[in-house]
Amino acid sequence: MPELPEVETVVRGLQATLPGKRIVDVRLGKTDFIEDPSALERELPGRRVLNVRRYGKFIVLSFDASAGSDYSGLLIHLGMTGQIVVCPTNAPVRPHTHVFMGLDDGREFRYTDIRRFGSMQLLPDGPNGGGFETLGTDPLEATEREFRTQISGRRARIKALLLDQRALRGMGNIYTDESLWRARIHPTRIAADLSDKELRKLYQAVQWILNGAIRLRGSSVSDYVDSEGQRGEFQLRHRVYQRKGKKCFRCGTAIERMIVAGRSSYFCPRCQRAPRGRARKKKTGTRR
DNA sequence: AGCTCTTCCTGAAAGC
DNA sequence: TGCTTTCAGGAAGAGC
């Protein structure tokens, strides 16, 4: 599942190959994940790629200006099973490949997505567009102070908050669980209840985990491969994710699984203490 | 504000 | 063996 480290790895691969290349043709398979398929076919041929960037879990390809075009970029989200590979035109086509863009060096940009949870849309010219305003801070670019701003005071469970792209952009299920384990924080803790010390540990854990995952080119749990078709290796370093029943690397206690924020959540019940018996349903007269 | 549930989609794995 | 069910989980929307 592509999260920040996987998307970052793909983007770095694309940065090494795409800038300067011109798109010569666009061919599409299934298009239900593309906002405006005919616009892609119409606008992209002839355009030169200027650069490739990551924004949270989004990939942005920027193009040179073109007379008569209102679009300057292509926004791509890999969803759950999206893959981008740049390969020779005669390379075997993997099943579920739905976007082909021929390049002027004789190679081909291919987008493959088994479940089509991904998305693709053209970005209009100008600074806005793409809905980036709703995205929060990049956890790797954030200072500890900025990180705290997104977390402290919130009444949501910490796991839900780490997954919320409006607070921090780029975290997904794997890296929230791994970060919470490292910081010894239970996924159902209320963010506002975390101590200063815990917030600092969480900030450091998030940075450590994300940087470590990028160094190993992401986690290949099922489908993920980078732009050269290579699997990542961070899955070998997972400490809790999908380790239900296995021993905690720190204390040997069996890892547990529960649903938090609608997601499978793995944690060590000993290292990550559950919050105190929830003072629920208090009949608060809280106005505001 | 924040929770749960549903939808999208396919394939692997588990259950009967 | 062969069918059905469950799970995977990014994001958006409904409803509470």
Image: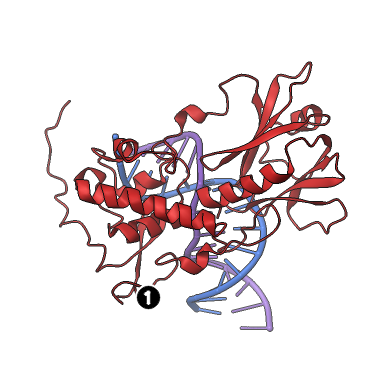
Chain colours: A red, B blue, C purple
At x 66%, y 49%, the residue is: A13
Can you tell which quarter of the image residue A61 is in? top right
Where residue A17 appears, as percent x and y from the top left, is 73, 44
| Quadrant in which the N terminus of chain A appears | bottom right
Tally the marks: 1
Can you tell which quarter of the image residue A180 is in? bottom left
At x 57%, y 62%, the residue is: A220
Nearest the viewer among C13 and A137 is A137
At x 51%, y 65%, the residue is: A235
Classify residue A99 as left or right of residue A232.
right
User: What subunit carries mark 1?
Assistant: A
Where residue C4 appears, as percent x and y from the top left, is 57, 68
Classify residue B8 as left or right of residue A149.
right
Nearest the viewer among A240 and A198 is A198
Relative to A37, residue A230 above or below? below
Please indicate, yes or no, whether residue A59 appears anywhere in the rendered image: yes
Q: Which residue is mark 1?
A: A245
Can you tell which quarter of the image residue A144 is in? top left
Q: Around disc 1, counting alpha carbons within 10 Å, would you say few (fewer than 14), some (14 to 19), or many (20 or more)?
A: some
Classify residue A236 as left or right of residue A251.
right
Q: Secondary structure at mark 1?
A: loop
The kind of residue tagged 1 is Gly
Relative to A205, residue A155 above or below? above
Please indicate, yes or no, whether residue A194 appears anywhere in the rendered image: no
